Amino acid sequence: MRSRDRPSKRYEALADEIEASIRAGTLRAGDRLPSVRQAAASRGVHASTVFQAYYRLEARGLIRAQARSGYYVAAVPPPELEHVSAPEGESIAVDVGERVFAILRATMRRDVVPLGSAFPSPLLFPLARLARTMAATVQRLDPRASVDHLHQGNAALRRQIALRYLVDGLAVDADDLVVTNGAMEALHLALAAVTKPGDAVVVESPTFYAALQALEQRGLRAIEVATHPREGIELGALADVLERQRPAACWLMTNFQNPLGSLMPEAKKRELVELLARHATPLIEDDVYGELYFGARRPPPAKAHDRAGLVLHCSSFSKCLAPGYRIGWIAPGRHLATVARLKLSTTLTASTPAEATIAAYLEHGGYDRHLRKLRHALAQQRDAMLASIARHFPAATRATRPEGGYFLWLELPPGVDAMDVHRRALAQSISVAPGPIFSSRARFERHLRLNCGHPHDERVEAALATLGRLATPP
């Protein structure tokens, strides 16, 4: 793994140097950075090198762009969480259902500030336009359409999804896709295709609690593998587990992992796919946050490096376009026939009106414009929440600084219990997601996941001030 102290590219070195100046106080909030042209000339580098460095600093929340004015130093966020998790690396039966459900039931109340929610604000999505599109689409819908697309889903929608892959440089044929009832069904179908009860599945540490629930439901065992909060699962630790334990599959988020927000570098994704191919181990890739990047381009999924058909790539429109429509998909590679049969024998098909609506929306354009607005809003909300954490939380608090998605992962000071913070916060109508629900062994007792996918208004600011007090050691 590349160390921050030994950057592999010139723009990374420049970004790290500027970050050090910001953290040392040499550059302060509000200071204007040299223009791209000035910085390129003074350092003897190409303008693209400076642009990439500034993009990287912007993604870290350290600088902000101001239209027709340049780049400025932002309010300094809390220190970044850097250390790698250290799970035992042994398989364990999963028993998280009751713990997770008890916490999630409490966070679904409308009267709470939804910092523990898994969903961004519905105000960020073009729901009115989708409703108009659905009304027009349903009027034109052929009654026979409800049975036309059994098996793999609406052909027009699969074509639009395949075009999205193509734009990102990934060749996936429309006939290689299966439309599902959201990403969760896609992930469950992938598990069913490549595992049997009693098998072990590799997950990150921490991992999304829904992955643990899925393993528990299917009678599977979990192997938590060491994970870096910025770059994802540690490949050395994974290689050791593959050699010793022969897991049936891996379930990973390579782009903006929930709860860490980690983004696996592209070279590391390639190494991951090659490593798994050597062991003939399938990768179930959960990529529901891939479109929510803050940088210059969409980070390609691990599927982009799949030559053996072992990556079952799963995603949906729920987090980026149409929450509640429950339209997802899977590109299951060599497991296509098995996944299609499983789909046909369980839920038959996704919602015909919802499939047709999203297909029509994508065909008529506007999706990329919506995504640009969504990413901008999420990046601003991330920065605002990090600044608020720096103001209100104890100095020993550490936080991730994701380059996409809408989750922050906090490490609280020694002596603070996340479950206790959760209970006390809920009594004041504030929800958080405590660390233990993201582990099969209830680890991460001092950690919280916070949702920055809602507008940072006075209510959110007051809630964070309250959380900061609750997170202060006695």
Image (spheres, rainbow, N blue to C red):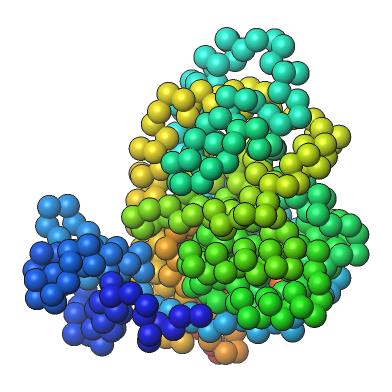
Badge count: 0
Q: Position of residue 426 (x, y in %)?
A: 62, 64
Q: Position of residue 259 (x, y in %)?
A: 58, 65
Above or below residue 137? Residue 212 is below
- The quadrant holding residue 150 is top right
Q: Position of residue 24 (x, y in %)?
A: 26, 87
Q: Position of residue 244 (x, y in %)?
A: 80, 80
Could one spot residue 172 in this view of the protein?
yes
Above or below residue 394? Residue 268 is above
Could one spot residue 445 in this view of the protein?
no
Q: Quadrant where the C terminus lies? A: bottom right
Instruction: Give the residue drawn at x 35%, y 64%.
Output: 59
Instruction: Give the residue drawn at x 65%, y 84%.
Output: 86
Q: Nearer the viewer, residue 106 or 448?
A: 448
Instruction: Give the residue drawn at x 18%, y 57%.
Output: 66
- The quadrant holding residue 254 is bottom right
Q: Nearer the viewer, residue 293 or 445?
A: 293
Instruction: Give the residue drawn at x 57%, y 82%.
Output: 84
